[in-house]
Amino acid sequence: TKRTIGLLFGGCSGEHEVSIASARAIAQALSAGSNAAVYTLLPFYIQKNGQWCDSAIAQQVLTSGQPLSSDLASSDPVDRWRLPPTAGDVDVWFPVLHGPNGEDGTIQGLLTLMQTPFVGSGILGSAIGMDKLAMKTMFAQAGLPQVNYMAVSRSQVWSNPCIYPKLCDDIEAQLAYPCFVKPANLGSSVGISKVRSRAELEAALDSAASYDRRLIVEAGVVAREVECAVLGNEQPQASIVGEITYQSDFYDYETKYTEGKADLIIPAALPEAVTAQIQTMAIQAFTAIDAAGLARVDFFYIEATGDVFINEINTMPGFTVTSMYPRLWGASGITFPELVDRLVQLALDRNG
Ligand code: ADP
Ligand code: MG
Ligand code: MG
């Protein structure tokens, strides 16, 4: 008998559109080649307002590739979180949700309560992977090298009387310019600024504080950006290493999602020892946060000194056919449909 895969996409996050694109690619892969004989696709779409939609609407969104033109809003607020009855038919969930309310442990908590296996990290790994401060603490504990950083809270930024001068003095003394100001719990570079002066720092702190209570400020490095895909549960494997190149000031939202603004180079042209070091660090990072199934681990490689710093881990990386994660596995010998099959099997191994 075929297994029913509950493909869960969309979501209440700034990465809603990316999720739709990832889901389209995964839906296609579930009916490609030998997958067609073993899997049945049952899609579920979560609107930007958080309301779940049944498979008929989800299929429409998958076909069009666009969010619903206007969110369906139920008059009964409780309906917004009511699962469509067909959720009970799902054998394995594939939550391809990026960012808050999906990649951060919230959906993983729901699926855990439902006692149905799901692809990817559980509650803990997802939550740590989404919070840049928690992530850095775990990385430090695992001995992974990182750039210098400071934790800042919204209440420090928005304090009355204003403590900007003292806070900014501390940041300048500890990190200097340029530095990066980030909300702790986001992705796709949303809310991130690169700052070079006191005025920019103040504006960036204010902006990041509007996204999250928890902020991080990091020393800026001049580095090549390289990424490694990890696949597995207890014995995770690392892929070939890829590099991202772009013309913009940093890898911001526009550069990430505008066609032609960034190039993926696979494999990255790196000394063999550096590649090996990155692969080892990627697996250590995966284990350090208790990730499962898949993750993409991103690094800064400073060519002049040979230093490799870990930047972050993403527990549900972009999953379109042109995304780094599936392309790294493609270059490592695993096709896109095979990768989707492996992830479902890993979900069953772990939770089944
Ligand atoms: P996100 O989770 O939103 O992708 P990142 O921490 O990866 O956030 O930051 C997004 C981009 O900002 C990075 O890919 C890089 O281009 C730039 N960046 C972030 N932190 C630094 C840093 N400390 N030094 C240099 N560039 C950085
Ligand atoms: Mg990220
Ligand atoms: Mg990133």
Image (cartoon, rainbow, N blue to C red):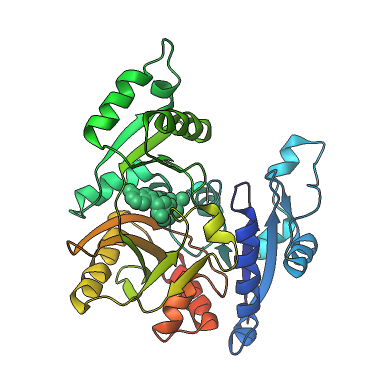
Lateral position of residue 50 relative to residue 301, left or right: right
Lateral position of residue 34 relative to residue 222, left or right: right
Q: Nearer the viewer, residue 242 or 238?
A: 242
Q: Nearer the viewer, residue 86 or 175?
A: 175
Which image quadrant for residue 166? top left
Give how far across and how far down residue 290 sits, in percent: 33, 56
Give how far across and how far down residue 144 sits, in percent: 21, 55
Is any atom of residue 126 visible in this view? no
Residue pictured at 48% horizontal, 70% vertical = 263
Vertical relation: 249 (above or below) 41: above
Image quadrant for the N terminus?
Answer: bottom right
Is any atom of residue 128 visible in this view? yes
Residue pictured at 76% horizontal, 70% vertical = 63
Which image quadrant for residue 301? bottom left
Lateral position of residue 323 relative to residue 298, left or right: right
Residue pictured at 42% horizontal, 67% vertical = 244
Give how far across and how far down residue 272 sits, in percent: 21, 79
Residue at the far top in the pictured view:
161
